[in-house]
Image (cartoon, rainbow, N blue to C red):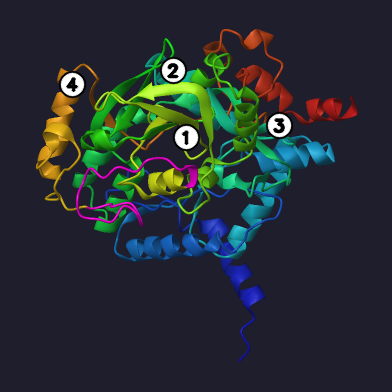
Amino acid sequence: MKYDFAAIEKKWQDKWEEVKPYAAVTGDPRPKFYGLIEFPYPSAAGLHVGHPRPFTAIDIVTRKKRMDGYNVIFPIGYDAFGLPTENYAIKNHIHPSIVTKENIANFTRQLKMLGYGFDWDRCVDTTDPNYYKWTQWIFLQMFKKGLAYKTTMPINWCTSCKCGLANEEVVEGVCERCGSEVVRKEKSQWMLAITKYADRLIDDLDDLDYIERVKIQQKNWIGRSTGCEVTFKTNTPDEVTVYTTRADTLFGVTYMVISPEHPLLEKWKDQIENWDEIVAYKEAASRKSDFERGELNKEKTGVQLKGIEVVNPATGKAVPMFVSDYVLMGYGTGIVMGVPGHDQRDWEFATKFGLPIVEVVSGGDITKEAFVSKDENAIMVNSDFLNGMTVKEAIPAMKDYVVKQGWGKEKTNYKLRDWVFTRQRYWGEPIPWWTAPSAAGCRSPRASCPWSSRWWRAMSSPTTARARSAR
């Protein structure tokens, strides 16, 4: 017997529309279960295999829970703000609200054809004013508590889309959407202060029933470390500060590296003898993403700041300073100390530029590679009063010494960064206008100018869209 899937499945999908067997029941006494997927972004291309793969897995779980007697809520929605729709709308002279409505209708049709057990009565569309009025409200509460703020920071800037990109949207120095060159550019951005919750994000993992490897991944992503900030004097009126977890290796510092975006470079430009060379390097670095710059196996590049010297407080010796793109302004202080005897990246950099390599932890052959040991019982050498101590003994001893000498202070640091909240120019989450005092003078319709709900609703109407297209 032939299975007429088109007729049979259409019959039951129509029946589900009528009787709504997958709708959650408010006030039902049965135990509750909440099945949640990541809501899809409704692009013009429609569903792809990356959508049904995870959706099917959770659909199976929710069906099993219903059979086990649970009152299941399994909602569906559309994370419908985004740059692809904005770019499509600009290219085709169609308002993004119209494009989004059409895309959502197509996604809905395709998802229903697949027969998922979603509760369609609870469908969410993030571009619906009845939805985003609540995201605006949440934003305002965060703003009032100092958790939403504006700052200037370097971002990945697409020279064609005229907007900021996430690191994963930059492929080999170009925008993955339009193929145009991407540069690093200082822009005023809205930020969410998630770093204020870094400790809780780590510590509260202990109470969750996640599998252990997921907990480890989360902890590594947040990247909490304890160490100290150390201040170095320079031959300028300015001091520089670095963050390190290994103050015990201070005696092995033979050079310093500063990020291309660091504001001290501009401040020192009259003292830097090869300023034109530094500018050229800064421009080249601006064309690389943070991911490309941070790759461990990439060729080490840099330029020495001629005319600038830094004094190592542990040895009293002056060491050169370089600008290099492997140092990111967004992590730590934007300046790092080079300990080539015991860090492979530093060893490769020092070897390339002919810098001294000093052994301060015994046990390796630093003429061939850096000695990077996890052995806490390795012995300190060439380190003044630390000589003969184990690494385990030397780390706290040197940390205390740094603080007592007034060279620095203890510090806890994180890899986690505050979240850049404004990447879209126009078709993105509307931020209430009254949170930005300068909004009235803004000309940019998105990233630097959060518009009001009234303006947003007006601009989202088809009538306004036609008027704008005609101009």
Question: What's under tag 2, amino acid-wise?
Answer: Phe
| Residue 213 percent location from the top left of the image | 28, 57
| Residue 174 percent location from the top left of the image | 68, 45
Tell me the tag on residue 403: 4
Question: What's under tag 1, amino acid-wise?
Answer: Leu
Label 4 CA crowd tier, 10 Å (few <14, some 14–19, many 20+): some
Q: Is residue 407 left or right of residue 465?
A: left
Label 1 CA crowd tier, 10 Å (few <14, some 14–19, many 20+): many
Q: Which residue is mark 3?
A: 162
What secondary structure predominates along the stretch shown in magenta? loop
| Residue 116 percent location from the top left of the image | 51, 61
In this picture, is 364 found above or below 139?
Answer: below
> Distance from label 3 to label 4 (Cα)?
46 Å
Nearest to N terminus: mark 1 or mark 3? 3
Q: How many marks?
A: 4
Nearer to us in this view, 373 or 121: 373
Tell me the tag on residue 143: 2
Residue at 39% over, 47% down: 347
Nearest to N terminus: mark 3 or mark 4? 3
Circle 2 — which element?
helix
Residue segment shown in magenta: 352-373
| Residue 35 percent location from the top left of the image | 39, 53
> Distance from label 2 to label 1 (Cα)?
27 Å
Tell me the tag on residue 328: 1
In this picture, is 286 found above or below 361?
Answer: above
Q: Are dots 1 and 4 in contact, CB under 8 Å?
A: no
Residue at 46% over, 36% down: 327
Q: Is residue 399 left or right of residue 443?
A: left
